[in-house]
Amino acid sequence: MTRPDPVRVVILGGGTAGWMTAAALAKLLPGQADVHLVESEEIGIVGVGEATLPHLREFIRRLGLDEMEFMRQTRATFKLGIDFVDFGAIGERYIHPFGAYGTDIAGVGFHHYWLRMKAAGQVPPICYFSLPIVAARALRFAPVPEGGDFLDSSYSYAYQFDATRMAPMLRAFAEAHGVRRSEGKVVDVERDAESGDIAALRTDRGDVIAGDLFVDCSGFRSLLIGETLGSPWEDWSQWLPCDRAAALPCTAPEGAIEPYTRATAMPAGWRWRIPLQHRVGNGYVYSSAHLSDDEACSTILGAVEGEPLADPRVLRFRAGRRTRSWDRNVVAIGLASGFLEPLESTSIHLVQQAVTRLVELFPERRIDPADRDAFNTLVDREYDRIRDFLILHYHATRRDDSDFWNHVRTMALPAELARKMALWRDTGRVELYTEGLFLEASWVAVYLGQGVMPHGYDQRADFPPHDRIGQSLSDLETAIRQRVAAWPDHADYLRRAGAWEA
Amino acid sequence: MSGALTRSVLVIGDGIVGLGAAIALRRALPSAAITLVQLPSDSGGWIDRLGAASPVVHKFHRQIGLDPKLFVRRTKAEPVFLRRYVRADATELREASTATIPFVEGVALHQIWLRHRAEADEPTPDFAAMLLALRDARGDEGGFGARFDPAAYAALLGEMAAALAVTRHDSADIEVKADGNVLHGVVIATGETLTADLYIDAAGPRSRLLTALGVGWHDWSPWLPSLTLTVAPGGMAATGEELLTTATHGLRWQTRLWDASIAPGGDAAPGRLAQSWQANAVAIGEAAVRAPAADGSLLANALEDILRVIALLPRPGSRGRDVLEYVRRAAIAQDALADWSSLTLAADGAPRPDGLGAMLETFDKRGRIAPRELDPFPPGQWLARLMALRPPPRRIDPTALALSDDVIRTTIARAAPQ
């Protein structure tokens, strides 16, 4: 059998998405993908994707990067979940942890027993039964040990990092693995007269870069998939009306560092707070129909704790995705493919998913439409399910203090989400999925955290004697408290583990 | 917030599936009255005559508290790890059991094997034998599950049901009393009307509860043949193996315990109920879906139905959201069973169900299958069977081509049977 020729891959854009794609293709497909990246130093990168999900660890592992080196370079901290403040109602908060509440008992989900005890008025808040939540509140962190017990396997972790430092790190990695880089702005896109596929990019420096497969990582501009191919965009602003963010980095306070990201609901959206080693990232994600840019900037300036390190920077976006992220011979990855606000830290995850799928479905020089269709099906499902989960955060609220919250509380939902919420409200059950990012534990966390109490729970939870469940819950709470008490302080652990950039 | 408990369940059918359902519900609902209606034995169903179940049976036994040693002793159950397909021209194909295909350096073993086969100077060992050799390293996943004596299994479950105070009624036939979409009772031969909060139809192909409620039927005869099963004791297979021989009129399937013949005929036309649960009545196993299978997938599907019923058991007076979720999950499992059945038993050139058609296209091209939501057959099980029954994919996966020759050689050498 003769070997197929290497596929000439041209990546447009050297932001987070571009260099993640380049690094992965170079590492995982040597000899199969001949990778050339075009970027311009004059074009800045968005790089606000500072909060990540545990899946990123697998990406780092597959590239063979050293975790502590990665954390030092990106000034990363550990993350056990997201603290949601004022979402269900002003004054309420909950952490969506990287882990589930409690453990199943006799095949019945923990939250059913908790709901039974709650109905009887005899149970502490459910957050006491989550190791990552208790640890996050205590500002403690420990890595997940190999072969640990049920508590050790009850959580996972991610990073909070400086995204602008990841691209240069991955660039060095990718170039060491044979990726060529061209500096320049694309001034012309040449298309094959017969097929209409993209044939080459021409830069302002006169370079002509020909390829078989083009990866559009040009961000919101989407030069290839959007401007050139005019691939349609599905708009989701009816459900996710936020379309701006005012970003503002600040100095880090002395002392403890939260091992979690905070999202605080605001009158016209929400704001993030992401503690890194050297600074704290902040930003106000808002709906421009409900708030002016000036008001957003002054609000975020007034809300932050540390000293601002720059003026607020306003970013514009719209929620939605391409109907085809892979169109002709162009694969859009990152913001060119779609945008979902960073409420659940999904931006980098969506890049990682798309890169992983591209590796799995990597084409030959002549692209098989079946591979393209399979890629689009997988990417669409990922986006659509995250979309519904984000909409839940807005819709599941009792807030009526602003036009914005009145709108999202009363808006019509996508049909699948309406069905999921009806099932939860009636029965305390979550629609079962095996694919997708946010599975049962995450849905339970947001429903209960935002005060959507179901009318029922699994009747099997009614059978064990009251005292026995009470004792089990109390034992679990004690075990979690004792485990966390033995964990080191998060900031101390960062230094001790070698993650700290001195 | 809390609500009523299910007070009573009436199970129709006392085969393996009906008894299993009654026992499992007794365990899940200790305060409910569980009643079973025994119908005369039926030759139409396959489950009660085929002593075969995937490893799901072990999960089921844990849930109902049946000692695995007792199961083995009473039913002569044996695990099977290798299937040998002997074709009409006497050529042999082999399929090893696995739930997952192992990965080496992020690349699936079958892709590495396919590259070695296409490029290496040395001979490539049998893929099934490689999976078997790795079984010890991966840990035993239960193989293809158990092959056992079905009558002994039904007797064991019958004793268990009796010990658990499941009430039983004999009836030559039943009459269903329905009002619109809701069941009001089942009249048995004595004239007595039995009522319950929940009715479970485990009567196999004779099922009638859901059809009495006006539920329709999806016909699968365009895709799947109607086949007849006959089973005789004593087969010619070696320990840990089963043998599938293409015969003049159908397929012969032998284990150490029994010898089954699957021939064109028609015990029952393949298909499934349009929805397996409506209001207070749910059909499980062959009462809900009929598809020929030459492995343990039929009983596995029925046992998963029982576990699904219990996992989603609605409280009386429920508004039916849990029932809709059951219908969704069960339909996915049933359609996967149609795909699985078609892959193994449909004639060459027969039209394929849409799901299987898409899977075959991607496998034949590049040895890959797309993840399928809630598929009861794990990806490794699909791939192992596709590797056994399909021609090698046309393309070697790029991730396998990207590995060094050294990694390919050592992986094959390490996985090859000693």
Image: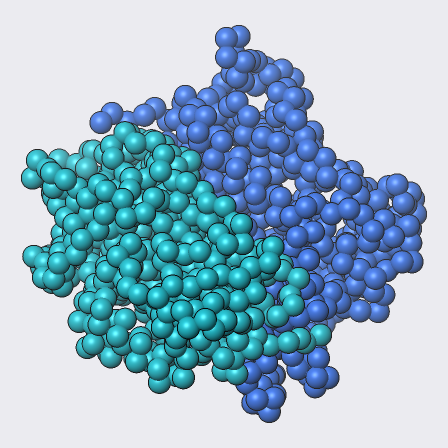
Chain colours: A blue, B cyan
Residue nearer the viewer, A486 or B386: B386
Q: Is residue B145 depicted above or below B381 in this figure?
A: below
Residue B413 visible to an observer of this rendering: no
Q: Which residue is pictured at 77% across the width and 54% down the height?
A: A395
Q: Position of residue A170 (x, y in %)?
A: 53, 43
Count all numbered tags in the image, as a single digit. 0
Residue B407 horizontal side relative to residue A455, left or right: left
Q: Single out the residue that lies furthest toward the top.
A: A193
Q: Which residue is pictured at 7% across the width and 39% down the height?
A: B90
Q: Quadrant of the C terminus of chain B?
A: bottom left
Quadrant in the rendering for residue A116: bottom right
Residue nearer the viewer, A474 or A410: A410
Residue B190 visible to an observer of this rendering: yes
Q: Position of residue A460 (x, y in %)?
A: 55, 76
Q: Which residue is pictured at 50% across the width and 71% down the height?
A: B193
Residue A311 horizontal side relative to residue A165, left or right: right
Quadrant in the rendering for residue A29: top left
Q: Is residue B164 depicted above or below A233 in this figure?
A: below
Q: Position of residue B93 (x, y in %)?
A: 15, 43
Q: Which residue is pictured at 56% across the width and 43% down the height?
A: A381
Q: Position of residue B324 (x, y in %)?
A: 58, 55
Q: Quadrant of the N terminus of chain B?
A: bottom right
Residue A212 horizontal side relative to residue A75, left or right: left
